[in-house]
Image: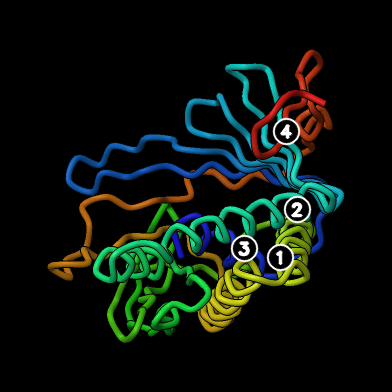
């Protein structure tokens, strides 16, 4: 559960206000020691559509019409993950996993065990592997303290995995931010896409079905965590997995603006060429 995932899920569950305009959100990295803010990525949400831009502006992801569009400005190309390509992708993944299983069958026991451990560490499992991938348990703990981030007062929460803190969140009520209803519509679009992807993977059966069930369980726990904090994280700071110390940087919401967004932001730019999602030639 990464920082952006926690942030977006937090928006989805805040649910306050009525909006007719879109919402622009800027996320930045904050160096706590120097105070320096470095913009990292932008989010645009309007009329059930969502766009996320990379820091350098060379890549973007669009969620609309139960599909995801991945844009690459450097090559003026895009890929589409829709129902048809989801089914195709799931089939290819199953084929690759079956091929890997066949190769593993001829490996020495020690090498096979090492491969199985590597697969489990990635949250996956080969058919017939010795053990299922570990399922982590997530929760949120109210620290009972207040803080500030991006000029907003907030309440501090810790996200814990298997009882160990992984992230510290600075949370504001959804009512403190205008346009959360519009944002929710965009998040619903992205969530519908994710559910469709999981369904396509389960329908295929085999290894991808197990992967879908595992990821679906993690998503459910993440949603439960965000329901518990009851607001929007305006800052996220990681704990070091080894020392347990808080990182010297945090991700901060530096802008949240309710405004009309140009419809072109949610369209494929003119002159872009479509590519196969998993490689191959242009259709």
What is the distance, in whole Å, between disc 3 and disc 1 at their CAs?
27 Å
Query: Viewer-nearest of labels 4 and 3?
Result: 4
Q: CA distance from mark 2 to mark 1?
A: 8 Å
CB-based contact (under 8 Å), mark 2 and mark 1: yes
State which tag comes first along the sequence, 4 or 1: 1
- Most foreground residue, 209 or 245: 209
Which residue does the numbered mark 2 point to in the structure image? 86
Image coords of residue 140 (percent x, y): 42, 82
Q: Is residue 131 above or below residue 150?
A: below
Residue labelled with disc 3: 11
How busy is the neighbourhood of tag 4: few (under 14 within 10 Å), some, or many (20 plus)? some
Relative horizontal placement of residue 123, taking residue 93 as reference (left or right): left
Look at the image and tell me whether residue 79 can be seen: yes
Q: Sort mark 2 into few (<14), some (14-19) or many (20+) by Cα contacts within 10 Å.
A: many
Q: Specify which label sits upstream in the sequence, 4 or 2.
A: 2
Give SS at disc 2: helix
């Amino acid at each position: 559960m990464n920082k952006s995932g926690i942030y977006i899920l937090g928006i989805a569950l805040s649910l306050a206000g009525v909006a007719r305009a879109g919402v622009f959100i800027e996320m930045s990295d904050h160096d706590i020691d120097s105070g320096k803010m470095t913009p990292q990525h932008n989010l645009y949400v309007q009329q059930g559509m969502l766009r996320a831009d990379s820091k350098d502006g060379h890549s973007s992801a669009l969620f609309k019409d139960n599909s995801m569009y991945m844009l690459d400005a450097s090559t003026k190309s895009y890929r589409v993950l829709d129902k048809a390509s989801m089914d195709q992708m799931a089939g290819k993944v199953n084929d690759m996993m079956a091929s890997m299983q066949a190769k593993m069958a001829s490996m020495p026991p020690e090498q096979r065990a090492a491969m199985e451990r590597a697969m489990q560490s990635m949250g996956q499992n080969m058919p017939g592997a010795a053990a299922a991938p570990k399922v982590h348990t997530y929760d949120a703990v109210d620290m009972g303290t207040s803080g500030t981030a991006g000029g907003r007062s907030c309440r501090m929460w810790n996200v814990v995995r298997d009882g160990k803190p992984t992230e510290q969140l600075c949370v504001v009520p959804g009512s403190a931010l205008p346009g959360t209803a519009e944002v929710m519509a965009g998040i619903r679009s992205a969530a519908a896409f994710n559910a469709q992807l999981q369904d396509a993977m389960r329908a295929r059966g085999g290894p991808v079905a197990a992967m879908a069930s595992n990821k679906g369980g993690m998503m459910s726990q993440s949603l439960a965590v965000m329901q518990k904090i009851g607001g929007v994280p305006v800052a996220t700071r990681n704990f070091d997995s080894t020392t347990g110390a808080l990182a010297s940087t945090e991700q901060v919401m530096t802008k949240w603006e309710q405004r009309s967004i140009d419809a072109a932001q949610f369209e494929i730019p003119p002159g872009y060429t479509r590519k196969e999602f998993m490689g191959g030639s242009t259709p």
